[in-house]
Image: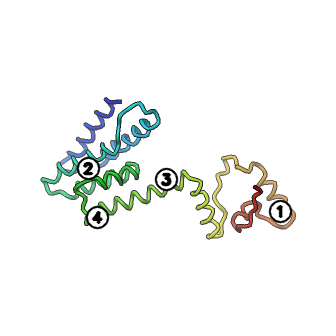
């Protein structure tokens, strides 16, 4: 694992040096993505000493040191933007909060905060049950049925198909989803 991290460090240095004094954002984005994968692996296995926040802080500091003398703020902005788009949002926010050269007037900094907040919210919606409830609430507000993947088995099994047919015969129509959307579904506890 140490060899992989060392090679990624060399790659990140080459990305920051860039071509003709421009940061190689494609290579830097790939390195940051690999850092994220390594970080997740290390958290699961607890067998390596890798801190993604330290590595990302090193990248930002190196980029600032490399391009500050050239007065190329655009390269520093590109580096910050690339990290915010490819690193986990919480890690990016930690890096930016610890960085000593943070400027509130930097548009890239505000853009990075915006990107982190949007990505964090999306990841939260995808991974939490409250995200599912939020999707149902939005569907109800819009007056439409939530999107259900037909290939995946439903939690309700064939029950929602049976209840649809029964209610259609009775004239109720809509089944369980209409009750959810109307907010009239009763669940026995």
29 left or right of 13 in image = right
Most distant residue in the front direction = 189
Residue 7 lies in what quarter of the image? top left
In primary-sequence order, the first of circles 2 and 4 is 2
Residue 96, by quadrant, is bottom left
Question: What residue does disc 2 label?
Answer: 60
Q: Is residue 43 above or below residue 85?
A: above
Which of the two labelled residues, at mark 4 and mark 3, occupies the earlier sequence position?
4
Measured Cα–Cα span from mark 1 to mark 2? 61 Å
- Residue 49 bears which disc, if any? none
Q: Cα distance, mark 2 to mark 3?
A: 24 Å
Q: Secondary structure at mark 1?
A: helix
Q: Earlier in the sequence, mark 1 or mark 3?
A: 3
In space, the residues marked 1 and 4 are separated at their CA atoms by: 56 Å
The relative height of residue 134 versus residue 60 in the rendered view (above or below) is below
**Which residue in the rendered view is the most extreme toward the left?**
69
Pointer 1 residue: 167
């Amino acid at each position: 694992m140490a060899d992989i991290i060392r090679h990624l460090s060399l790659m990140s240095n080459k990305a920051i040096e860039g071509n003709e004094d421009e940061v190689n954002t494609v290579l830097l984005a790939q390195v940051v993505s690999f850092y994220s994968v390594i970080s997740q692996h290390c958290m699961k296995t607890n067998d390596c000493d890798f801190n993604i926040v330290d590595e990302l802080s090193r990248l930002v500091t190196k980029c600032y040191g490399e391009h500050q003398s050239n007065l190329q703020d655009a390269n520093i902005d590109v580096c910050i933007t690339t990290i915010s788009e490819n690193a986990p949002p919480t890690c990016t926010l930690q890096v930016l909060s610890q960085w000593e050269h943070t400027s509130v007037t930097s548009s890239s900094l505000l853009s990075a905060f915006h990107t982190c907040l949007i990505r964090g919210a999306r990841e939260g919606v995808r991974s939490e049950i409250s995200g599912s409830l939020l999707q149902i609430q939005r569907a109800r507000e819009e007056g439409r049925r939530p999107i259900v993947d037909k290939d995946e088995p439903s939690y309700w099994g064939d029950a929602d198909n049976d209840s649809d047919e029964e209610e259609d015969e009775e004239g109720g129509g809509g089944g369980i989803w209409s009750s959810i959307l109307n907010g009239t579904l009763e669940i026995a506890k």
